[in-house]
Image (spheres, rainbow, N blue to C red):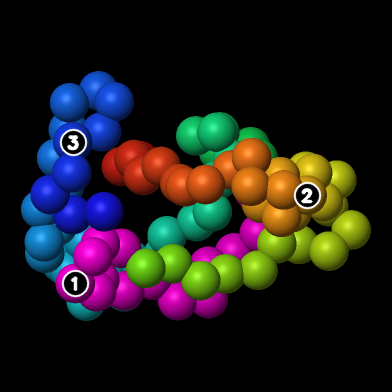
Amino acid sequence: MFDSVDKVGDTILPGAFQKSLEAGVEIKMYYEHSRLLKPGKWDNLAEDDRGLKATGHLTRGHSLAADLRAELRHGTVRGMSIWQC
């Protein structure tokens, strides 16, 4: 979400993602910031008036994706994290 302070004190401003999105940079879906754990892929990433809107699919048959799907449905996972690699 734009203009909100996260737990490490960072604030993301509107337009923060636009340059990468316009350049067509491939953004991968990682789990817990691990480049080894890719439970799915993003179908669409775009800025809206609230923040970065992400839609994607979890990989069927992938054990981590099944666990993550269950956590999302249960409400255990309520958000996502971003980082530059």
Q: CA separation, marks 2 and 1?
A: 29 Å
The residue located at (66%, 51%) in the rendering is: 72
Image quadrant in which the C terminus is located:
top left
Count neighbours of disc 3 (C-alpha within 10 A) and say few if under 14, some if 14 to 19, many if 20 or more: few
Image spot of residue 81 (x, y percent): 41, 42
Q: Earlier in the sequence, mark 1 or mark 3?
A: 3
Count neighbours of disc 2 (C-alpha within 10 A) and say few if under 14, some if 14 to 19, many if 20 or more: few
Amino acid type at image mark 1: Asp
The range drawn in magenta is 38-52
79 with respect to 74 (left or right) = left
Q: Earlier in the sequence, mark 2 or mark 3?
A: 3
Q: CA separation, marks 2 and 3?
A: 28 Å
Mark 1 residue element: loop
Residue 63 lies in quadrant: top right
Mark 2 residue element: helix
Identify the residue position indicated by label 3 in the image. Answer: 5
Image quadrant in which the N terminus is located:
bottom left
- Is residue 9 visible in the rendered image? The answer is yes
Amino acid type at image mark 3: Val
Instruction: Tell me the chief SS of the magenta region.
Output: strand
Q: Earlier in the sequence, mark 2 or mark 1?
A: 1
- Residue 68 is inside the magenta segment: no
As drawn, the label of residue 70 is 2
- Is residue 23 visible in the rendered image? The answer is no
